[in-house]
Image: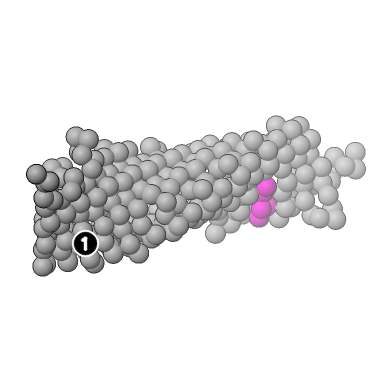
Amino acid sequence: MRRMLWTLGALLALVMTTEARASAVRLDADTLNYDPSMQKVLAQGHVTLSRGTSRMVAKMGEARTDGSVFVLRGAVSADLREEGMALGSEELMYFSGNNGRIVASGDVSLRRGKDVLHCDVVVWRFSPTPSYNARGHVHLEWEGKHLWAGAVSRDGDLFRATGLERFEDKTQGMTLLAPEFEGRFEGDDVVEVVASGGVRMELRRTNKLVVVTGAKGIYSTKRGTLVVSGGAAAKQEGRSVRAESLVLRLDTGRIEALGKPQVVFPISTP
């Protein structure tokens, strides 16, 4: 009876505190125990954390009695309808209050609309526009595009990737490699990507490979162009062109050389 009273008191504190800040957060489980020394509620079996229409489930969990932090562990599955996304991970920390956020770790898979994010750890902040940081074996998919990197972050309309392994636009048959990668969104659509630190772009057309290299590249999805500058060079089947900058039109594969262009053709052996 004493343990039950401790548990009921703890749950009441959790709900009242979080209701005062935002919508109520409810913790349910097969077993709930209150640890007065740590000021925590420990949950075991069919653990469910609810907020509005959102649901997060796991094998076990814990919560601070002030309702500020909830931790779920073991096969975590989250249907975050208020944020329009679904998430799976091994562990999830939910922070309530004005700076609400979740921190998911361990084989993270996050889906938002048609976008899919895989990584080791992601911090997702609750805000009117998408705001997150992902790191560790990051693989981001959207609209036929794939990005592999060590870390990716997005803050509203801007995103950045570091430790970039490669970027692929399968609809254009293009692969882009560069150490650093920045982009700009309009809504949920990527409209521009800037690659820097040494760029290599591979474009395949009818089994013919075009390779473009340079110091910096600007990829515009609206114009369907890639502009490479800084010692720009393009090669295809023994032919090459060098210039201060090259403009590659992805729909036709046509290359425009701007600024001191030099074209090299191979000479066949008689």
Q: Quadrant of residue 207?
A: top left
Magenta-highlighted residues: 67-71
Q: Mark 1 points at which residue?
A: 232
Q: In this view, does 204 lie above or below 68?
A: above
Looking at the image, which is closer to me, 204 or 267? 267
Residue, x 43% and y 40% (percent of image)? 116
Residue, x 38% and y 49% (percent of image)? 166
Q: Quadrant of the N terminus?
A: top right
Q: In this view, does 15 lie above or below 133?
A: above
User: Dot 1, how many residues are within 10 Å of its Cα: few (below 14), some (14-19), or many (20+)?
Assistant: many
Please give left or right for residue 17 compared with residue 209 in the image.
Answer: right
Label 1 secondary element: strand
Please give left or right for residue 50 compared with residue 34 in the image.
Answer: left
Looking at the image, which is closer to me, 55 or 208? 208
In this orientation, does residue 22 appear? no
Please give left or right for residue 53 compared with residue 143 in the image.
Answer: right
- Numbered disc total: 1
Residue, x 19% and y 34% (percent of image)? 206
Residue type beneath disc 1 = Ala
Q: Is residue 264 above or below residue 46?
A: below
